[in-house]
Amino acid sequence: MLPETLEKILDIGRELAERRALEPLLSYAMETALDLCDAEYGYLVLLESDGSLNFRVTQDRRDLVIEL
């Protein structure tokens, strides 16, 4: 694993420990994941207790929300 990749993963861990609000944390995680994967857009999906999928973050590299 490249040192830069490891550093970004550790940054996400630090943010998890510091942030208390879920939405900004999810957006930060998505931004970092897009960067790590060099992706154009991404979706962060949470599995609800009833088995349904909850699309919490849908954004592209320019931090624009993708409409589903």
Image (cartoon, rainbow, N blue to C red):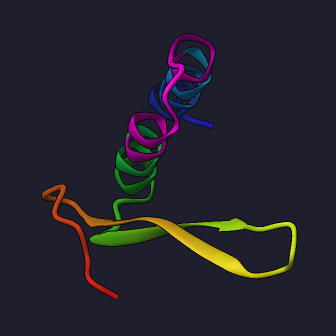
Number of marks present in the image shown? 0
Looking at the image, which is closer to me, 21 or 39? 21
In which quadrant will I find the N terminus?
top right
Residue found farthest to the bottom: 68
Going 35% across and 88% down the picture, which residue do you hit?
A: 68
Instruction: Find residue 10 and report its image quarter.
Output: top right
Residue 44 drawn in magenta: no
User: Does 24 appear above or below 51?
Assistant: above
Q: Which stretch did the figure color magenta?
A: 15-27
Going 75% across and 82% down the picture, which residue do you hit?
A: 52
Looking at the image, which is closer to me, 54 or 27? 54
**Residue 32, percent from left and from top:** 40, 42
User: Does 12 appear above or below 60?
Assistant: above
**Residue 38, percent from left and from top:** 34, 60
Q: Is residue 6 left or right of residue 66?
A: right
Residue 21 drawn in magenta: yes
Q: Is residue 42 left or right of residue 40?
A: right
**Residue 30, percent from left and from top:** 43, 51
Q: Which secondary structure class fits the magenta region best?
A: helix
Q: Is residue 19 left or right of residue 39?
A: right
Looking at the image, which is closer to me, 51 or 25? 51
